[in-house]
Structure formats: structure tokens, C-alpha cells
Image (cartoon, helix red, strand yellow):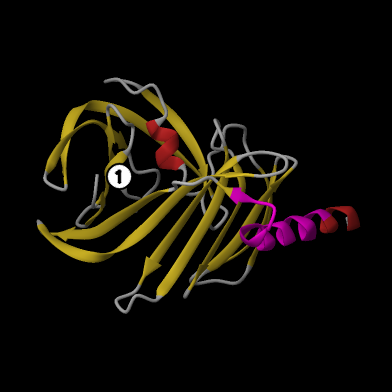
Amino acid sequence: MKHRCFEIALALSMVAAAPAAPALAEEPGPRIDHYETLSERGGVLKHGGSYVRTMSKVTGPGRSRWRVEVEWPDSTGRIRSRQISEAEIGTWAPIWSRVSADRDSAALAVVQGRVIGWSVPVAGPTRLIDQAMPAGTVAPEFDLEAIAARPLVVGYQTTITSLALMGELQTRRIRVERADTVEVAGHLRDCWLVTSPARFAGDSRLTVWVDRRTRRVWQRRGDFDAFAWVHRLMHP
């Protein structure tokens, strides 16, 4: 028991320290994407703000990995939520993640095939996490890359298990429905239209537009019974 508590404390200290570790060196030229968010009710689209998603490769002693940082500003420009996640190159497997927001927070790390950490949800007490991680699990914030990296052709389907930022394991069935186009900054992009059904009562059906050539995700949409949300890339 003492040994397990030590492992958890060590992993959490790694999560807390990782963003500022002086030994890490980020490669030049990270990809910075600006997304706008919209909501749709009764056929009317309403702008809901924007966020910035930065993806970069991090190198240093031990292993290289992907890092994604997502920042959500409020109407004054103050960052109200910051999410950071690192994943293994090639598999998108989780290494560690952290979310710090006005209303919730969490810190997770993977140690010997287990996810350990804590989360404080919007409504509810602090939750301690120590659970097995299934093989093939995708890191938080990397599920879109995992979808885009699959051998997408019309009719292709598979299942993707991802680790959510608050520690839940989520499984999605995806299917390539057809070739489609989506407009980005006034230009039409040739895409694969990928869908995923709702996973449980009250969940959102998901549609993703993946560029057929570059494999970038230009847009994603979630559909509920009477409400929809849209995240779309603002620049090519």
C-alpha cells in the first residue's frame, strides 16, 4: 500500500512539473489552430466564442512525444480554461495531462499501464483515480488525430477508446460515410465525412470532416435532439 501511494505521489509530481521542466526542448514551428465555436437551435447558428489549439513535438532525454495545449479565453481575453496533454508518437497513447479551469480541474499520469491522478468536476467532490488503461487507449485531446490517422475510405469503421481529461474512459464507434466538402476561409476542402453515433442516452452524435490529402480536421459537429454545437477551423 505504501509503495502504491508513493507511485501515485511521484506521478502527480511529474504531472505538476512537466510543463516547466528545463530539460525539454520543443521543436520550432508548432501548429497553432484557431477554432470558432457555434451553437445551433431551431436552425439558427449563434457564435459561442473561440479557442486556440497548439500542437508541437517535444524532445528531450528519454523519448519524444506530442503535446497539445488548448486555451479558452473569455470575452475579455482572460484564459478561463487551459488543457495540456502529452501522447506517445505513433500510437497517441497517454503520458500525462492536466486541465485547469474556473469550474473544474484534473491531473492524470500513466504509470505501468495504469491511469492515476485526481479530478474535481463541476458538480461533485474530488475524485481520486487509479484504474487500468486498456491497450490502444488514445490520450486526451488527441482523439481527432487518432481518427484522421486511420486508413479512411468510404465504409471504413472501427472503435476508438480515449481517455477523457477528467479521467473517464470513452469508447466511440466511427464510420466513414462518404466523400464531402467543407468551406474553410472561403475555400472548399475535399474531406472524408466521418460519423460516430451517440454512446449513451443524452450523448451527442458526432460528425468530423477530415481533409483527404492533409488529414487535418477542418470541422466537427455534435448533434443532440434539439441542439447542435460546431467547432470549425478559422484558417487553412
Q: Does the magenta stretch include residue 32?
A: no
Of 189 and 58, which appears nearest the observer? 58
**Residue 121 in view here:** no
Task: Report the residue at 90% width, 58% height from top.
Answer: 2
Instruction: Where is residue 77? Give x, y as percent.
Output: 34, 75
Rendered residue at 62%/39% (across/down): 64
Secondary structure that dominates the magenta span? helix
Q: In this picture, which residue range is highlighted in magenta?
A: 7-25
Q: How crowded is mark 1: few (under 14 residues within 10 Å), some or many (20 or more)?
A: some
14 is higher (above) or lower (below) than 156 = below
Whether residue 155 is situated above or below residue 107 in the rendered picture: above
Q: Is 225 situated left or right of 114 in this image?
A: left
Which amino acid, mark 1? Arg
Q: Residue 93, located in which quarter of the rendered image? A: top right
Whether the magenta-drawn stretch holds residue 21 is answered as: yes
Percent x, y for residue 62?
A: 72, 40
